[in-house]
Image (tube, rainbow, N blue to C red):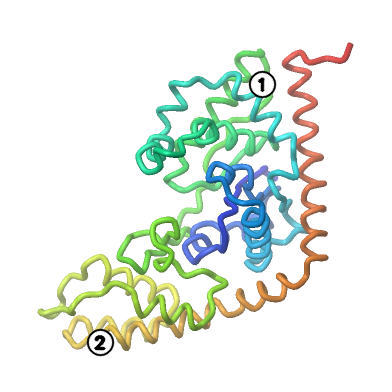
Amino acid sequence: MEIVVSGIRSTGNLHLGNYFGAIRNFVKMQHENHCYFFIADYHSLTTHPTPTDLHDSVKTVLVDFIACGLDPDKATLYIQSDVPEVAELYLLLNMNAYLGELERCTSFKEKIRTQSNNVNAGLLTYPTLMAADIIIHKAHKVPVGKDQEQHLEMTRTFASRFNRIYGVDYFPEPVAYNFGEDLVKIPGLDGSTKMSKSENENSAICLADSPEAILKKVMKAVTDAGPTEPNQPKPQPIENIFQLMHAFSTTDTYNHFSNLYDRCEIRYGDMKKQLAEDIIAYTTPFREKMEALNQDDAYLGKVARMGAEKARESAAKTIREVREIIGFKRM
């Protein structure tokens, strides 16, 4: 079985874009591969969360992972900071990572542009920490979106550079796990083509959102005055509403509103109410599982400890061998 590694940053509740973009596929992958899924709390430190916020966010993501179907008995599900070997490998990789290549990273340049008052060393070396997360388990594949492809390429660079410097064939060069047609892109309610909380929280529907919150968000979704000619092309915000309906409503419901649009008879209020009802029906089982898990700290602690134990067994072996290769030997 191939080793697959992926992480989710601990920034609160997962939304429908996260679920369809990755988590739903993680659930399938855990039955076919040797999977490591982690909650990236080290990474979140670049934004300086308070201790309470950090702890609550980690718990939220752990709950969401399990509620979405990740099975701690099938996959290794752990918290990044519970595996200190990751930090050691991060340090070792940084010794052979160069300023120019880190500064050229697209995500780093974007952070400089958008948060110039917080350009810290953690942001600069983000790619080496991501590489450590992946190669600590000698992964073969990594599920990544388009926005992370450059980081995966840098991981390949760091792995091959280590092998070359020390004359070994130790780290595999991981490749992207291709979901193919299984990857579903969920658009935002604000008219953007990708659902995201970072730009606008009201644009994203979280799996834990109450029915009231979902209805409120959907009813505020961006629309227009409606078509003025039959079979008129849909502007992006309207196309988004139809894409969401295609994902969560029945074919008959989708066709009904599509025909109304083509005949210039669409009433967006009615369409949004139906869409909200269908999304609520879809997310309710997830929300109910999350509510139950949030009350079971004993079980969550057991899952975290079991995941840490399994992840550390793999990571400790890697670090022992890496230290030997580099030349750190006991006197």
Distance of label 2 from label 1 (alpha carbons): 62 Å
> Residue 189 is drawn in which quadrant?
bottom left
Looking at the picture, how far across and down is residue 9, in whole percent? 57, 50
Seen as rendered, the residue at the extreme right is 331
Residue name at image x 65 percent, y 60 percent: 56
Q: Earlier in the sequence, mark 2 or mark 1?
A: 1
**Residue on which disc 2 sits:** 267
Q: Position of residue 274 (x, y in %)?
A: 39, 86
Q: Give coordinates of residue 82: x percent, y percent.
A: 75, 45
Q: Which residue is mark 1?
A: 169
Residue 37 vs residue 196, the one in the foreground = 196
Residue 321 shown left or right of residue 223 in the figure: right
Above or below for 103 versus 198: above
Residue 84's label in the rendered image is: none
**What residue lies at 21% left-to-right and 75% top-to-bottom?**
224
Q: Amino acid at mark 2?
A: Arg
Residue 99 in the figure: left or right of residue 310: left
| Residue mark closest to the camera, 2 vs 1 | 2
- Amino acid type at circle 1 is Asp
| Picture residue at 45% right of the left edge, 60% below the top | 197
Residue visible at 50% across and 53% down in the picture: 179
* Depicted 300 relative to depicted 179: above or below: below
